[in-house]
Image (cartoon, helix red, strand yellow):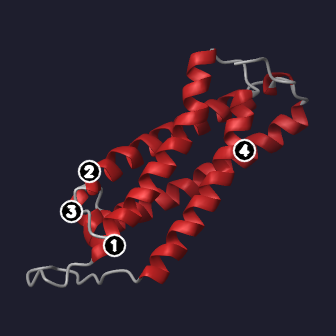
Amino acid sequence: MKNPPFYIEELVSPLRRILFLFILTISLGYGFGLRYLYLTTEANPTSLQENYLGNEADVDAEVMKFEKTEKSLLTFLHDHLFALGILQLIISFLLFCSKIPSKIKSFLVFEPFISLLVTFTGIYILWLGVEELKYIIMISGFLFHLTFMVNLVVLGVKFARK
């Protein structure tokens, strides 16, 4: 990776504070989103599948879930891909302009985009009926969440330092 035009560690203090507050705000919003994700999918492949395909056939289900319509699914996918894609672009740019080892930087910059594409494309294909994808969706989603949170922590620490 080539050297960036500037390093975030060398930014003036007021700008670093603004960026720290941005990262803190994103982290809080992301935390609420993760909590919602856990409440709707219980972090397991079967609940994830039921969240999109419904569970009307399960007479013993505690909570009845209905299959998402294509319109609601496309709205969900559109909103998540645009919002997370833009946030990841900003975070990747900030990471690119940081003083961290090149190989780690490359992984943290590019992996979340790959995971986003696999996860949300997988959700659509799952909805089309390829139920085996629920495991790949869980793995790619977990990888995205892990790298996204690591990115937020790395940037938060860099902006909080004097």
Name the residue beneath numbered marker 1.
Answer: 52
Name the disc covering residue 146, or none: none
Q: Is residue 56 above or below residue 28?
A: below
State how far apart marks 4 and 1 are (Cα). 29 Å
Quadrant position of residue 3: top right
Residue nearest the observer in this picture, 47 or 69: 69
Please tell me whether mark 4 or mark 1 is closer to you in this view: 1
Name the residue beneath numbered marker 3.
Answer: 46
Q: Identify the mark nearer the N-term, 1 or 2.
A: 1
Name the residue beneath numbered marker 2.
Answer: 135
For the residue labelled by badge 1, is the local secondary structure a helix, a strand or a loop? Answer: helix
Please tell me whether mark 4 or mark 2 is closer to you in this view: 2
Q: Is residue 81 above or below residue 112?
A: below
Q: Identify the mark nearer the N-term, 4 or 1.
A: 1
Q: Identify the mark nearer the N-term, 4 or 2.
A: 4
Residue that lies at the very extreme toward the top in this rendered image: 101
Residue drawn at x 28%, y 61% is 42
State how far apart marks 1 and 3 are (Cα). 10 Å
Name the disc covering residue 90, or none: 4
Residue 70, x across and y down, in percent: 43, 80
Quadrant of the snapshot with the N terminus? top right
- Residue type at mark 3: give it: Thr
Do callouts 1 and 3 mark residues in contact (Cβ within 8 Å)?
no
For the question of whether residue 18 can be seen, the reply is yes
Residue drawn at x 24%, y 57% is 45
**Which class describes the residues within 10 Å of circle 3: few (<14), some (14-19), or many (20+)?**
some
- Residue type at mark 4: give it: Ile
